[in-house]
Each structure stands twice: as structure tokens, then as C-alpha cells.
Amino acid sequence: QVQLVEFGGGLVHAGGSLRLSCAASGSIVSINAMGWYRQAPGKQRELVAAIRSGGATKYLDSVKGRFTTSRDNAKNTVFLQMNSLRPEDTAVYYCAADADAGWGTSEYWGPGTQVTVSS
């Protein structure tokens, strides 16, 4: 099994910054993609940013130029640096990983961390 835990959520004023981190632990053989999703009240969960083990990234259009994702493969950790935050970025942010725990690749999720941006 693989466990994911997010850190770094909180309350910030518009224009401010937050840095989220997510650490994967457990019987990990390998991790391919890691990513960040978010879900605001009454809205569907959406992919915010993803990063492959080789470093290739992709972003939601509305966060391009403001958010940056990176990872430390040695520590099975992924980060999301969020700058110039807007009230519409308010959501629960979830970490996800496509990981092999010894019986093939499965998708794993963290419990989520709240990000609130005040206007």
C-alpha cells in the first residue's frame, strides 16, 4: 500500500503565496506521475498540475505562470508552489500518485488540504 499526506494548506490573502508538499510512503516500488487536484464547493475535482518522474509537467490553464510543481524522486515527495493566489483558487487540494506497490500501478490519493484565499 501507498499512503499520501499533504502539508502546507491554509488561509492567505489574495496575491499571496503558499507551498504545498505531499509525501508518499509505504511499500513503494516506483512512482510515475504525481499530481495535484482541487475541488471547490459545488464544483468537480480538476487537475491543477502534474509531473512525471522524468520531470515533464502540465498545468491547468488558469494557473499557468502562477503555480509551479516539482518533485524530489529520492524522497517520493511532490511540491506545489502557488503564487499570486486568487479567491477562485480556494478549494481542497489533493495529492495523487500513480504508484507501483508491488502488484502493478494504481492511483493513490491523499486526504486533502484546505487552501482558502481571501479577497
Image: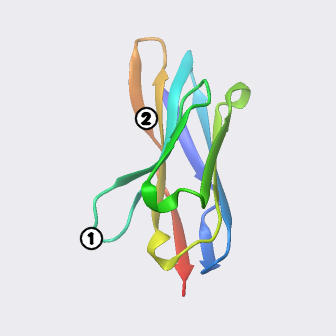
Q: What residue sits 62% from the left and 30% below the top?
A: 55
Residue hosting label 2 = 108
- At which x and y percent is residue 118? 55, 84
1 versus 50 height, above or below: above
Identify the secondary structure beneath mark 1. Answer: loop
- At which x and y percent is residue 103? 41, 12
Identify the secondary structure beneath mark 2. Answer: strand
Kindly identify the amino acid type of the residue bearing the numbered disc 1: Gly
Labels in figure, total: 2
Q: What residue sits 49% from the left and 18% below the top?
A: 101
Q: Nearer the viewer, residue 86 or 28?
A: 86
Q: What residue sits 56% from the left and 15% below the top?
A: 29
| Left or right: 97 as drawn, with respect to 28 | left
Q: Residue furthest bottom?
A: 119
Q: CA distance from mark 1 to mark 2?
A: 23 Å
Say few, some or many: other residues with alpha carbon within 10 Å of mark 1 (under 14 / 14 to 19 / 20 or more). Answer: few
Q: Earlier in the sequence, mark 1 or mark 2?
A: 1
Residue hosting label 1 = 42
Kindly identify the amino acid type of the residue bearing the numbered disc 2: Tyr
- At which x and y percent is residue 73? 68, 27
Q: Nearer the viewer, residue 45 or 50?
A: 50
